[in-house]
């Protein structure tokens, strides 16, 4: 320790010496001292600035000498310090050598002790290893027992799974499989046999899925087989509920039978106290009753819905719920398409009934599945399936019956479709398009009826005798009155035989109209229409029939008919028009009952105007027929226009013409008064015009005075006829005016009253007001031509007579120009 202290003292002395020598260095200037201090204390980054400052002072050599001096000084100080501490270093090395020897001794002792311990603990290690080995054996045995206990449920459940699969209990097998996979196998999955089990169980899930699909397909096949029975049962229930197709008599009989059946099940006994006791007796079972029970089975009784529920559960466990729902809907859509598509063998009515029953059964099953398994089908899916089916059903029925010409077949199909509508409506399906289909069928049915009755109408027109009905007894009279609404008070007092104004055709047409209306009502029965709608529809149908009949009559009258036929047709038309009111009453009695007769609640009125055009056509045909007949008779006229003197009596054709007119106008007794007067007036006008044309014809070149006298005599016969015309209501003066033009012309020419004619021409009060100057010129020129041809006329006073006639002609021409 003295050495240490001495060394420290020396070091401190040396340090102080070095510091004193550094401070007392006299050769450096203050600036150089500062630069050295900066180089010693500054970092390397600022050294360039110090060196630049040294170079900027310009005394670089002096600074280099100072720097060298400083370096030498530091070297000396380092040597002094090393010399001062050398002894201490030597002492430290000697102490380390001694410590090495001590450490080696300790190591040798430690190795000896370790060898002794190893020798002593060798037996102990052997015992310890035996204990560890035995404990490991015990642990492994316990572990094996525990694992075997865990594996036993796996094996038991696997055996249970195999048994359930063999017994076709697929849902229970699937639950067992789920339990194996998620509960038991997870505990023993480290064992190799579990891998074998897992591989063998993988196809089981697929097998269960396939078996479920197969079972569901069998269920669908079963539905297809019994759908017709289900539909038939549903339709029967609907028919009974709505009393569809059951008359009041049948309904009463059924109630009576039910009452008798209930009465037969009750026995009445008298008890000991004298009171009456009723006992129910179980009815005997008969084969027919068993058949009725079979018919009363519902969809649940006829079909086992268990496969559907089981499939839903299986696929729910499999996690394929959506897959099964899509598969179910796809299969049902395909099955619906098969059910809706009609068979090619549908060639009779029974096949169509079975076709609709299968459709009803299909949708009844769909409704049942919707109620029990709402996840398989929703209301929107059901409505969509029904809408697609409804469109195809309507197309098929419309295609099959759109052109059906059979009325009875249409009626039967209407009842079947209506029952189909009511049945589907009872299950909540929309049926408005089917009512529209029935509306189309109704229109087609009515059109078929119209065609049938129009054909019968034409046949009646052809075979009618066009003579008034004659009855010879009271029975025949009452029979006619019963068939057609005709009343004439005076007719009941008339003696037999009695005559009706109309022919048999009117009774036939009226009877056919009522039959047609009854036929229309048959189709509208049970169509859920109110009384007003039925009444209006039937009235529209009646108007259609009357309109068609009017068209037939309009065509018929253009045939070559006789005057008697045309007159009788006109009379018949009048009574057909009057019968429209009776038809309206008949419709009201059928649609609203007898008590509604007389009310005016309906909006559609039977149109009596439909026959107006026909009547106009008949009137024109009568006018034309009269004109043609008059023309035929007048064409027989063979006037000798150069006749020297009149015969003193009417011409033969005039006599025939007047006889024809008398006979024809007498047959106008039952014609409407206006029509008879019109025909009479027009005929007389036509006769007057025809005679005027005959007189003024260009073919007649000359006319003698005798011919004019004969022509005037014929016109006079016509005028006499107008005064005694048999048509009731005709004014003789008015009728005689039809020949006024011709009479004035004849009077003027025959009397040669040219002075008066010229003086009064164009005045309102003129004597020959209706005579035109041009007409008078034609007749006068023909008379002049005859005089010119007469022998000797111009030989006697030729100049005076010629000048007079030329003057008259010239004056008439001037009047014509005015």
Image: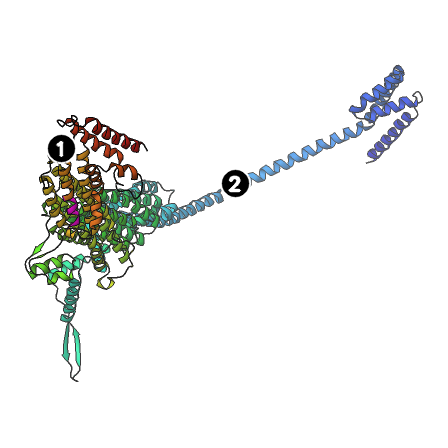
**Which of the pair 723/135 is nearer the observer?**
723
Q: Position of residue 389 (x, y in %)?
A: 27, 45
Q: Residue at x 28, y 36 (%)?
A: 758
**Quadrant in which residue 250 is drawn:** bottom left
- Left/right placement of residue 451 relative to residue 49 reads left
Q: Which residue is mark 1?
A: 641
Crowding at dot 1, Cα within 10 Å, few <14 / some 14-19 / many 20+, comes out as many
Instruction: Name the side, left or right, on which 95 lies relative to 793.
Output: right
Q: Nearer the viewer, residue 711 or 481?
A: 711
Looking at the rendering, the stretch of residues picked out in magenta corresponds to 717-729
x, y (%) of residue 174?
A: 31, 48
Residue 119 bears which disc, if any? 2
Label 2: how many Cα within 10 Å (few below 14, some 14–19, many 20+): few
Cβ–Cβ under 8 Å for marks 1 and 2: no
| Numbered disc total | 2
Query: Compared with residue 817, is residue 763 higher up or lower down, i.e. above or below?
Result: below
Q: Which quarter of the image is occupied by the C terminus?
A: top left
Q: Residue furthest left?
A: 472
Task: Give the camera-side residue of 456 and 95.
Answer: 456
- Asked whether the viewer can see residue 166, the reply is no
Residue 399, x across and y down, in percent: 22, 41
Visual colour scheme: rainbow
In the rendered image, residue 19, in percent from the top left (x then y), is placed at 89, 28
Q: Is residue 121 left or right of residue 472?
A: right
User: What is the residue that sits farthest to the top in this orientation?
Assistant: 61
Q: Residue at x 22, y 28 (%)?
A: 800
Which label lies toward us, 1 or 2? 1
**Residue at (89, 23) in percent of width and height:** 33
């Amino acid at each position: 320790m003295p050495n240490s202290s001495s060394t420290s003292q020396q070091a401190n002395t040396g340090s102080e010496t070095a510091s004193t020598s550094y401070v007392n260095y006299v050769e450096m200037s203050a600036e150089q001292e500062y630069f050295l201090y900066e180089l010693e204390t500054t970092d390397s980054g600022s050294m360039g600035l110090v060196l630049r400052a040294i170079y900027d002072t310009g005394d670089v050599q002096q600074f280099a000498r100072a720097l060298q001096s400083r370096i030498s000084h530091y070297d000396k100080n380092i040597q002094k310090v090393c010399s001062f501490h050398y002894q201490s270093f030597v002492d430290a090395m000697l102490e380390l050598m001694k410590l090495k020897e001590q450490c080696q001794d300790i190591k040798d002792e430690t190795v000896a002790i370790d060898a002794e311990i190893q020798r002593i603990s060798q037996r102990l290690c052997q015992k310890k290893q035996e204990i560890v080995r035995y404990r490991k054996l015990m642990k492994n045995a316990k572990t094996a027992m525990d694992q075997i206990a865990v594996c036993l449920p796996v094996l038991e459940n696997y055996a249970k799974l195999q048994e359930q699969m063999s017994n076709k209990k697929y849902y229970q097998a699937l639950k067992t499989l789920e339990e194996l996979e998620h509960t038991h196998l997870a505990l023993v999955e480290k064992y190799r046999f579990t891998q074998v089990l897992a591989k063998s169980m993988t196809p089981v899930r697929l097998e269960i899925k396939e078996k479920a699909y197969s079972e569901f397909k069998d269920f669908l096949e079963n539905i297809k087989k019994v759908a017709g029975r289900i539909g038939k049962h549903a339709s029967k229930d609907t028919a009974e509920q709505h009393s569809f197709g059951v008359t009041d008599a049948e309904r009463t009989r059924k109630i009576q039978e039910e009452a008798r059946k209930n009465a037969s099940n009750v026995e009445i006994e008298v008890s000991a106290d004298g009171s009456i006791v009723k006992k129910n007796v179980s009815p005997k079972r008969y084969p027919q009753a068993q058949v009725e029970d079979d018919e009363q089975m519902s969809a649940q009784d006829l079909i086992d819905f268990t496969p559907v529920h089981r499939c839903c559960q299986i696929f729910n466990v499999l996690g394929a719920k959506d897959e099964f729902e899509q598969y179910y809907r796809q299969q049902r859509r395909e099955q619906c398409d098969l059910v809706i598509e009609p068979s090619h063998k549908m060639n009779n009515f029974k096949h169509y009934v079975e076709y609709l029953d299968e459709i009803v059964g299909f949708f009844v099953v769909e409704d049942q599945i919707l109620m029990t398994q709402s996840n398989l089908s929703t209301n929107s899916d059901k409505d969509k399936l029904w809408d697609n089916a409804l469109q195809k059903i309507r197309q098929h029925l419309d295609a099959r019956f759109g052109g059906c010409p059979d009325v009875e077949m249409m009626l039967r199909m209407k009842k079947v479709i209506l029952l189909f509508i009511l049945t589907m409506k009872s299950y909540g399906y929309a049926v408005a398009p089917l009512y529209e289909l029935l509306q189309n069928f109704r229109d087609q049915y009515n059109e078929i009826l119209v065609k049938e009755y129009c054909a019968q109408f034409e046949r009646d027109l052809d075979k009618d005798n066009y003579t008034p009905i004659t009855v010879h007894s009271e029975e025949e009279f009452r029979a006619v009155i019963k068939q057609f609404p005709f009343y004439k008070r005076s007719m009941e007092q008339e003696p037999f035989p009695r005559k009706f104004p109309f022919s048999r055709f009117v009774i036939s047409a009226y009877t056919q109209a009522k039959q047609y209306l009854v036929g229309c009502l048959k189709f509208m029965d049970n169509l859920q229409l109110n009384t007003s709608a039925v009444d209006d529809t039937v009235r529209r149908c009646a108007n259609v029939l009357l309109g068609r009949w009017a068209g037939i009559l309009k065509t018929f009258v253009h045939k070559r008919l006789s005057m008697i036929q045309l007159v009788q047709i006109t009379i018949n038309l009048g009574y057909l028009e009057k019968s429209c009111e009776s038809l309206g009453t008949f419709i009201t009695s059928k649609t609203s009952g007898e008590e509604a007769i007389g009310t005016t609640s309906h909006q559609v009125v039977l149109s009596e105007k439909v026959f107006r055009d026909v009547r106009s056509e008949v009137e024109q045909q009568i006018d034309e027929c009269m004109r043609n007949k008059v023309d035929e008779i007048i064409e027989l006229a063979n006037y000798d226009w150069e006749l020297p003197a009149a015969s003193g009596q009417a011409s033969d054709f005039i006599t025939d013409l007047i006889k024809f007119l008398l006979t024809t106008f007498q047959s106008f007794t039952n014609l409407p008064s206006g029509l008879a007067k019109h025909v009479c007036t027009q005929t007389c006008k036509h006769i007057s015009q025809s005679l005027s044309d005959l007189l003024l014809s260009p073919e007649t070149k000359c006319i003698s005075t005798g011919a004019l006298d004969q022509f005037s005599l014929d016109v006079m016969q016509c005028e006499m006829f107008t005064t005694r015309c048999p048509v009731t209501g005709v004014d003789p003066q008015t009728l005689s005016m039809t020949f006024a033009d011709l009479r004035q012309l004849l009077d003027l020419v025959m009397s040669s009253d040219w002075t008066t004619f010229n003086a009064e021409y164009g005045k309102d009060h003129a004597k020959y007001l209706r005579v035109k100057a041009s007409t008078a010129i034609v007749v006068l020129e023909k008379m002049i031509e005859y005089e010119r041809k007469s022998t000797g006329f111009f030989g006697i006073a030729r100049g005076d007579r010629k000048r007079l006639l030329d003057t008259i002609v010239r004056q008439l021409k001037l009047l014509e120009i005015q």
